[in-house]
Image (cartoon, rainbow, N blue to C red):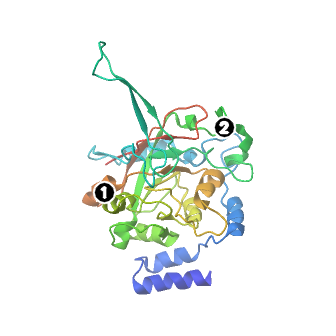
Amino acid sequence: MKLRLVLILVHVVLGLDPIGARAAEEVASTSVLRNRADFEVWMKELSNWGRWGPEDELGALNLVTPAKRQAAAALVREGVSVSCARLVEKEKAADNGAPFQHLMDRAGTNNPGYSSADTFRMSYHGLAHTHIDSLCHMFHQGRLYNGYPQSGITSEGAQRLGIANLKNGIVSRGILIDLPLLKGVEFLEPGTAIYPADLIAWEQKTGLKVGAGDVVLIRTGRWARRLKLGPWSGSFAGLHGSCARWLRERDVAVLGSDAAADVLPSGVEGVAMPLHQLCLVAMGTWILDNCDLEALSQAAGQRQRWVFMLTVAPLTVPGGTGSPVNPIAVF
């Protein structure tokens, strides 16, 4: 704890993070996730198991109430919509080992009929395609969120916690946390860890406060960097596992980012993707991966407005562990 406070004060003095005294005090009350032992403790401390009943399959999306949706709709002033999805990647690349396959069943050439048709094939989990992880996507010590057994995921799909639980979609307040803008850079370099201090700094900068049922979108500038320098693999900027406690305290319903949410490598000894497991398994917080937040960053920056209504409509696949999606922000 003392080391953490020293680091915070150094950041303030050197101007590395514009957090100020109030933010420093809040960060000092948090702790750092260091290793497997810490992770196991956090899995219990941050757990939402049973919070919404023993049969619950929605997790933190229970916090998106009708009132929350109404409040989100009230944020729409201009009717301007912005997609947060990537165009699907059809070519293999360093960060795309499973390209999207678009097969034409009937084209317009040599076709005596009256229609065209095609088939899509997609392995969406990974680091290329915009998708949402269902709560059955991750498990820990044989258990899924809310204590459901890992064995409930069979060759037929997931018996519980599948993506079809989101048949009615997600409509809530979205908040963009733009880390390159906060730090005055074009993009974060691969492997850069984002800490609670950074998230609190953004709240201080914008005057916002992340709250229950919000969808938080983390921009690292990944796609801006890819456009400039080309695809890469192995390391990505993202949230350090220590941010899980902040997410739990704020009661975030959905966490999204332009990569895999977790910083890669994780920096937590013995745990590859701590944030994914803490969110999906312990807290029931849904995750949006590989969003394209460049257009959203531009739209929000032009308006100096970082909140909006966000909608997400997954495919309703019974037993699915997630779905490709096109999140839409509406100002």
**Precedes in sequence: disc 1 or disc 2:** 2
Position of residue 163 relative to residue 271, above or below, is above
Residue at the location (69% across, 67% down)?
36
Q: Among all residues in the image, which is located at the extreme front? A: 110
Which of label 1 and label 2 is nearer to you? 2
Q: Nearer the viewer, residue 154 or 220?
A: 154
Which residue is labeled 2 in the image?
160
Q: Nearer the viewer, residue 157 or 196?
A: 157
User: Residue 112, how many percent across, how many down?
Assistant: 29, 12
Residue at the location (29% across, 18% down)?
110
Q: How far apart are marks 1 and 2 (CA)?
A: 37 Å
Residue at the location (61% across, 61% down)?
274
Which residue is labeled 1 in the image?
300
Q: Which of 40 and 191 is in front in this view?
A: 191
Q: Tell me where residue 188 sits by quadrant.
A: bottom left
Name the amino acid type tagged 2. Arg
User: Residue 329, how many percent across, how many down?
Assistant: 36, 47
Left of 91 or right of it: where is 194? right
